[in-house]
Amino acid sequence: MTTEMQEIAMTEDKPLLRGQSDISKEHNIETPNGVLHVIIHGSRTTRRPAILTLHDVGMESKSCFSTLFRFEEMEEIVKHFTVIHIDAPGQEEGAAPYPATYDLYLTDMLVLSHFRSIIGVGVGAGAYILSKFTLVHPNLVEGLVLINIDGNARGWLDWAAHKLTSVTTSLTEQLLAHLFSQEELSSNTEIVQSHRERISQASNIYNMELLWKTYLGRRDLNVDRNNSFKCPVMLVVGDQAPHEEAAVECNSKLDPTTTSFLKVTQPPAKLTEAFKYFVQGMGYMASSCMTRLSRSRTASLSSTYSIDGSRSRSRTLSQGSQGGQMPPSPSQTMEVSC
């Protein structure tokens, strides 16, 4: 199997952004398990690792990451890296139905292993998949940003509760309960209504259900201080997020010298800055690239769970960035909230 991205068979579909067809395009990638939909933008000639994203269940790459990677402050990152957004099999808009027996994790690992090296950014199910891949292929992953990760297998009580819920609750409401806090669902905010409409009207909702069942059947990551990731890791979790306890537990099992734990809130601009500091700590962005942001940013670094600026799932990291002072590098554990 190849490890160079250029050796993958790609079929161009359409530009992601109007007027930017030369730098941002959608592709269909031929894999041993079928065609996979990806969106690629940024530098095509860099020897740096690709920034590769994987979305959560009930979403796809556009609904999960588009606003973040179109954000003005992300231009510096996109300029220096190739950015690849992968849609889990059958999750892109208009996807044909997949067979009930398809293996999500195997498929994704076969695709990911074509790249020379990556910095992974995963949300929920995507964070779990990237974690599994990193444990199997540690030499291919140079850094991980894991948002709202749950690395635990479901227990018997969780299994029984889901069986009961699946009888009385629609798939749409099950996915919303995974994506949003009970407080957000009770408030029935505009973004909750938007996602409810998007999921309920999706033509590929059968594929969403397959992915949901696959994710629910996940196994433990089985990480601990002696069997941890070999790369820097930034864990991000939202205040009152459904998986906050699981993310905290995951943090307790990882190497504290290479792990940052962020509890964040507010718009995506702040997560952008935190991510830039993360990759700079890995040696891929010069200090001069951060000067403008250091002058313009306050002490709050933040994000949203769906990375669309309209949610409050991933919460606030407070860290001094004034006067050019750099926050801790990935080799330090940060557990801060506001």
Image (spheres, rainbow, N blue to C red):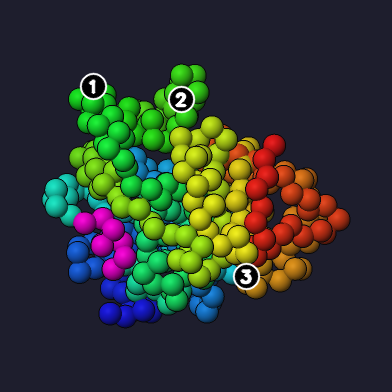
Q: Identity of the amino acid at label 1?
A: Thr
Q: Residue at x 46, y 43 (%)?
A: 246
Whether residue 38 is in magenta: the answer is no
Does the image show residue 155? yes
Q: Residues within 10 Å of mark 1 (few under 14, many from 20)?
A: few
71 shown above or below 82: above
| Residue 89 point in image, percent of width and height | 26, 54
Q: Identity of the amino acid at label 2?
A: Gln
Dot 2 or dot 1: first in sequence order is: 1
Q: With 206 as the anchor, is 77 left or right in this view?
A: right
278 shown above or below 188: below
Q: Identity of the amino acid at label 3?
A: Met
| Residue 197 point in image, percent of width and height | 35, 28
Q: Are marks 2 and 1 in contact (CB under 8 Å)?
A: no
**Cα distance between the residues tagged 2 and 1:** 17 Å
Dot 3 or dot 2: first in sequence order is: 2
Q: Which segment is the magenta one?
A: 103-110
Q: Nearer the viewer, residue 7 or 101?
A: 101
Q: Residue at x 68, y 45 (%)?
A: 336
Tell me the number on the disc at residue 182.
2
Q: Residues within 10 Å of mark 3 (few under 14, many from 20)?
A: some
Q: Residue lying furthest right in this view?
A: 323
User: Which image quadrant: the C terminus?
Assistant: top right
Q: Which residue is mark 3?
A: 282
Q: Residues within 10 Å of mark 2 (few under 14, many from 20)?
A: some
Q: Residue at x 31, y 74 (%)?
A: 8
**Cα distance between the residues tagged 1 and 3:** 48 Å
Q: Which residue is mark 1?
A: 168
